[in-house]
Amino acid sequence: MNRHMAILPVAGIGLIFGLFAQAASIKLLSANIGNSDLICTGYDWKLCRSSVEQRVTDSIRAIDADVALLQEVVPAERCSARDERKRGFVCYAFANRPRNEQEQARRILGPDYTIVVTRGAFEAVAVKKGVGHIQGCPDGSLCVVSGLPFPSSCDQGFSITPVDVEIQGKQIRLINGHPDSISISCRAAEVAAAFQSVIPGRTLMAGDWNLDPYRSNDQSARVWKENFKSLGFHYLSGIAERNPPYFTIFLPLAGIPLKTLDHVVSDFAQGDCRVLGVSPGTKRLDGRSDLDHRGILCNLEFGKPE
């Protein structure tokens, strides 16, 4: 990756004197947008319906986040391999879509973002142009990157994706997490790999981690808690907002709360997060009952430029 990146200017008198540079304040969205509708089983429970995609798109565009980490998008590579002949599905007439609209992450987020999608998986990280840069990905483009390597015996559709970005002069590592939801041993290994990829003092991790460290103590939760403490991380979501934390995943259609699987944590950033559609005064991304996860919206400060 290219590590020689331009430093974005910081507004204000501090730029002139070099002593009063302000912290970088950003709005961050982390959301698993998988569709819990039974009709999406053929899409591995990803966001398969065009009508739901449009509602989620409208919500995300209205939020206008500076940084977005998405899980369970349908990548172009999956649509290109699928001969979808039914209207109303996101892969319908895929070959006829303009090239810049083939990736679901781009359709949802729009043209104002630099986006990386994870090869062979269902995740995306985006940074708004004018707010920051993704290293190795030209501003405004969409790039495909590899996630961390997983054991061959584990489901390769899950991923942990570290992305190095520069936000208003601050070099940070974003880690988009979506480890195995079924195999505890695979999930534990994947969570350990995520913490092994941390850059001390400049890492922010978000995503659907498929573990509830507040209510569970399985192998993956123990690995999470041990590394979380030893590496000096703190919660920006979960108990940072409310103790006990709000649930982030619900039984489809019934709306029964299950666990808190979605987390935003850091070893440097400060701020506050809310669970969309659960925290008072917030709305869920789908507007109805299609998504089983609830997104997390955060207002964060990244510290002074380096």
Image (cartoon, rainbow, N blue to C red):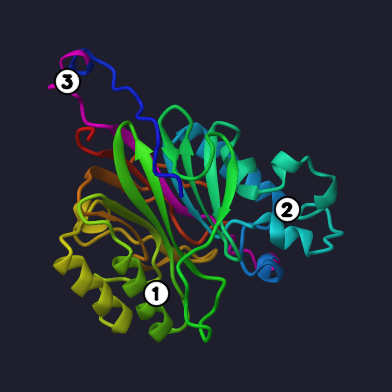
Three-letter amino acid code of the residue under disc 1: Glu
**Horizontal side, residue 42 vs residue 133: left or right:** right
Residue 180 location (% of width, % of height)? 46, 75
Q: Which residue is mark 2?
A: 90
Residue at image point 21% right, 62% down: 244
- Asked if residue 148 is among those painted magenta in the image, a careful observer would answer no
Please state which of residues 215 and 15 is positioned toward the viewer in this rendering.
15
**Quadrant in the rendering for residue 196:** bottom left
**Horizontal side, residue 102 vs residue 203: left or right:** right
**Horizontal side, residue 99 vs residue 254: left or right:** right
Q: Which residue is mark 3?
A: 18
Name the quadrant of the C terminus.
top left
**Quadrant in the rendering for residue 37:** bottom right
**Res 128 visible:** yes
Three-letter amino acid code of the residue under disc 2: Val
**Quadrant in the rendering for residue 132:** top left
Q: Which residue is mark 1?
A: 190
**Crowd around label 2: few <14 · some 14–19 · many ≥20 (10 Å):** many
